[in-house]
Image (spheres, coloured by chain):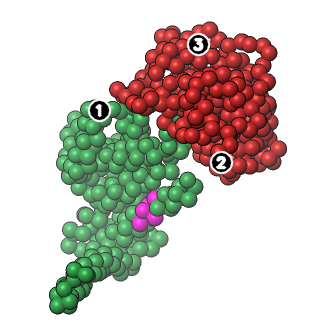
Amino acid sequence: MQPAVVAAKDTVPDLVEIALSAQAVSAWYGSKLAIRDINLDFIRNSITALMGPSGCGKTTFLRCLNRIHESALDARTAGKVLLAGTNIYDADVNPVVTRRRIGMVFQRPNPFPTMSILENVTSGPRYTGMTNEPRELADLAEEALRRAALFDEVKDKLRDPALSLSGGQQQRLCIARALAVKPEVLLMDEPTSALDPLSTLKIEELMEHLAADFTVVIVTHNLQQAARVSHFTAFMLGDADRVGSVVEFAPTGEIFTHPKDSRTEDYITGRFG
Amino acid sequence: MIADSRLAPRRRLGGTAGILLTGFCSALAAGLLIVILGYVAIQGWGAINPAFVTQLPHPVGVPDGGVGNGIVGTIIIVAIAAVIAVPIGVLTGLYLAVYGRGLSAELIRFLAEVLSGVPSIAIGLFAYTICVKPFAHFSAFSASFAFAVLMLPLMIRTSEEAIRGVPTSIREGALALGLPDYGGVVHVVLPAARPLIVTGLLLAIARVTGETAPLLFTAFGSQFWELNPANPMAVLALQIFTYAISPYDDWHRQAWGGALLLILAVLVLNVGARLALGRHGKKS
């Protein structure tokens, strides 16, 4: 079988500044340890892919980065996540405010079902108290929809129900909704796994532009996607007890051409996963 | 094949008999309902005319007269009951669906279930004890209180189910945007749950609209256009009761008319609930 390397990015941003840093992050569901002791730095304005087979804890780890993991029943986290130097798990840090700075896009499009396209995009700025000014909201919405490469498709039907859009459009709407609160970091949990190839392509294309303004972390079990869109790749794997950890982290070009760990090599050459 | 060919005819006979029996019972049940509805319709139809739904009751012997005040009273009492039961029911449902864990949630669920089985006359007696006796005065409000207690278990259950039915991904979407907990609930979760909550409300209203027992010693009834909930008030179900046990033919006729009105109202509420549900079903 051919190595699954497509067009690995080897351009790494020149300016290296750490936007988000995970330090010894572990997470539990009840008494079940899901990920162990993950250390990972995310460079500002870069796209980092968390890659690995199903069940290796990549989504769990992603959900620790904006403290949404803890909203599940019995879920628990240990370790530090530094956002611009501040640990978001410090006792005096409000998780609600943190989540405004670290946006998230989910595996399945989840537009708010009772709202219009416009209301979906403006819901963040409105209900987080950013602004209530209709003019400002409209501007924010247009900017966010343009960044999500959706504006031209919906500009004449902003008042239509969000659910009238196709699946791919709904996912871009969710990206626009996340961008409208102007986060610093954008977490994407397998954002194209529920979409057709054409919609996937559109989202991968817009991701290139996102890195200019945001730090992006994307979970994917799709090798080609990691190779196509990311600057850095972290390869994760679950051990015998299904506890996930990071096996290897490197610039994407390197990990796809000269993996240092044999398990990484096995995965990208398609020997398992 | 395991089947013994000699047994087959007997088995087939037994099966046929079983099917016939279930079919007969179903036909009996459906037939009984149709007979009741038809009988009420035939008996009540003649009594219903514009005067019947707009006028006050007339004394015995005076022709015409209606149950207009009872219709208005029913609407007022049920409306006040809904105003009491909806916020308590929805918030309790929200607690059970989102925040309630462990023993306290189980206990509330259990109590709501028990409450839904308490006979309505007992709840009427309770309303009488705390809303009528201390004031030495029957009132529409005390009836609303009793109705609210009757509606509460249904509102709690349907609200909990409606809110639980909102996908976690929608709730997390609000959370991930940095909406505070209540913001997500108010702007995202409750609107998404609203069609089902409205359905539950309509069913709860349908459930209490025909209740009569708790009214006997709460709303008490009235011969006048009474709009003040602090006073005794006419209620349709109560008027049916009074007219039905009277010895007068004309009042019997009016009792049937009132019964038909009640059935129609409950029918409309049930159909409305189904429509609300159907719209919701198509949307998601």
Eyeballing the image, is A254 above or below A20?
below
Q: Secondary structure at mark 1?
A: helix
Q: Are marks 3 and 1 in contact (CB under 8 Å)?
A: no
Q: Which residues are magenta?
A: B267-273
Q: Disc 3 versus disc 2: distance between alpha carbons?
A: 32 Å
Quadrant of res A256: top right
Among the chains pictured, the one given green colouring is B
| Residue drawn at point x = 42 percent, y = 23 percent | A76
Q: Dividing the picture into quarters, in which one does residue A115 lie?
A: top right
- Residue A62: x, y in percent? 56, 27
Q: Could you say which is closer to the camera, residue B185 or residue B120?
A: B185
Between marks 2 and 1 in the image, the one whose residue lies nearer the viewer? 2
Q: Position of residue B106 (x, y in %)?
A: 27, 37
- Amino acid tagged 1: Gly
The residue at which mark 1 appears reads as B102
Label the red chain with its letter. A
Residue A75 vs B140, above or below: the answer is: above
Q: CA distance from mark 2 to mark 1?
A: 38 Å
Q: Is residue A41 left or right of residue A144?
A: left
Q: How many marks?
A: 3
Instruction: State the SS at label 2.
Output: loop
Q: Which label lies toward us, 3 or 1?
A: 3
Q: Residue at x 40, y 39 (%)?
A: B97
- Name which residue type carries label 2: Leu
Q: Between B206 and A208, which is closer to the camera in this rendering? A: A208
Magenta-colored stretch includes residue A84? no
